Image (cartoon, rainbow, N blue to C red):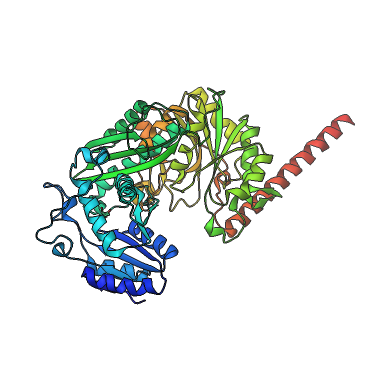
Amino acid sequence: MMLKTIRKTGDLRRELARARKKGKSIGFVPTMGYLHDGHLALVEECRRTCDVVVVSIFVNPKQFGPAEDLDRYPKDLRRDKRLLARYGCDLIFVPSVREVYPRDFGTSVGVDDLRGKLCGLTRPDHFDGVCVVVLKLLLAVMPDKAFFGEKDYQQLVIIKRMVGDLGLPVEIVGVTTVRDKDGLALSSRNAYLSEEERGIATSLFRSLELARLLVASGERRSHVIKDRIMSLLVDSGVTKVEYAAVVDPVSLDDIRYVDSEARIAVAALVGRARLIDNIAVDSRVGRRSRGRQKRGTVCVILAAGEGKRMKSPRPKLLHEIGGVPMVEHVVRASRAAGVKDVFAIVGHKSEKLQPLMKKLRVGTVRQDVQRGTGHAVLQVYPLLAGFSGDILVLSGDVPLVRASTVKRLLAQHARHSNAITFATVSVPDARGYGRIVRNQKGAFVKIVEERDADREVRKISEINVGLYCFKAGPLFDSLLTLTASNVQMEYYLPDSIQSIRSRGGRVEAVLIDDHTEGFGVNTAAELNAVRKIYSGRQKNEDNKRGLENGIHRKRRQ
Ligand code: PAF
């Protein structure tokens, strides 16, 4: 079917009657236009499961309050049509306001016990406005299935109830929220955000992540979860928090304890944009803190990356160096330095890494969506609830790090009671890397990224290796407040250095002699280079051993 635009309900019904006669199933995605990937995910799901895809574009005046953004609601019909054609939509229904609401329209529809909760507290007529338009649109299209995003969770629950109560023969399908790389839920209203506000807006996602981690770590009290959400939002610069709620997923009633499935929802003003977001949590899922270890050192190995640039079907960390998988060298370095408790953050192709991790007695924690190294480390939070020791962070793809270096780092960390101790190297060519700036006494001052570096800073050859020891408390506090204001939109672990320092934490950068210890493997060429260095090191050590044996023999003679 060619993409057709229809404006009248009668024409739409006639068109769909023909399809129905041919036995085709009809899927429907109602929208208010200005489409983003969240809408397109609904269209995709509709295309995947139905024969005919109908999308409506109608900015419904009845769901906007008097002081809301009806007049400035973003519109771009031409772009929407182009996108819908690309995503396999068959019919676009674009009715006028008079077509949907004739002059004498006087009917109202609503779900009594759901309309006043959550967003309904501040938008009293909103959900009745949604119900009436969705009912009219469903009656016009008469689809087999209609698709709604979980981002508007209360809307989804209300529509399911309305359809159930009225016995409408349509299946309501909820589709998972689509997020930007930094976690911000997609919404047409994100268009109102300035660059700075965009960073603040991610605090909605971050506060829900925190809530998820709290539940996974065994926190059951809703008031504690809500307080933590509130603080994070306010500390991040949100203009006004409308609500932070822990509710039953069906009745939307507040719950005091999370003892099975729950929905955690937030609504907040960021600048002039009103944003909402929510997540599902389930107290029965997830791994709780093992509760035994409160102190000491735990090692976290970053092992979730995709390793795309290796261009190999094998996970990057399983490529061998000297007959041993790359990541095993890192585990060995940690254990030989005296850190026995090791976790790996896994994600991409994790099933292929698991057997090795099991063999090495390394616990694994999943990072389902890769949102950067800072976000990766945060995933161990539930396992380490109540832990006040140190967290050593190593990268699974930096395999030449020596146990002696890790040991030295840990010793400095303990000796100076640092909040962070991290390793640096001096390289022949530091282009492309953040430079370590020290003061005249040689103490660490800051890391300056290449793009922010002036001529003097560019002359510095000392760079960060990605080998850290953190005090657990300051680390988690900083990870929860990081923003992802970089081109990749990722939460970077190195950003926690500045954040911990600005809160008074002591930071020390330890320069290590052999810069090859910091070599990371991202490509096949880099793997070869690392293999050569490794076998060179082995030869040196063999020679040294040979020499020592020779000396011993001579002495005995
Ligand atoms: O979710 C929306 O975009 C709207 O509320 C809907 C369902 C299209 C009704 O106007």
**Residue 443 in sight:** no
- Horizontal placement of 206 versus 275: left or right? right
Q: Position of residue 378 (x, y in %)?
A: 45, 37
**Which one is in front, 176 or 74?**
176
**Residue 475 in sight:** yes
Q: Position of residue 89 (x, y in %)?
A: 35, 69
Q: Quadrant of ligand 1?
A: bottom left
Quadrant holding the C terminus: top right
Q: Position of residue 432 (x, y in %)?
A: 43, 53
Report which quarter residue 307 is drawn in.
Answer: bottom right
**Which one is in front, 321 or 164?**
164
Q: Which residue appears at 62% of the width and 52% of the height?
A: 530
Residue furthest front as drawn: 167
**Which one is in front, 510 or 227?**
227
Residue furthest bottom as drawn: 2
Q: Position of residue 296 (x, y in %)?
A: 55, 24
User: Does residue 445 lie above or below 44 as drawn?
Assistant: above
Report which quarter residue 42 is drawn in.
Answer: bottom left
- Horizontal placement of 99 versus 213: left or right? left
**Which one is in front, 61 or 389?**
61
Report which quarter residue 310 is drawn in.
Answer: bottom right
Q: Which residue appears at 36% of the width and 28% of the height?
A: 222
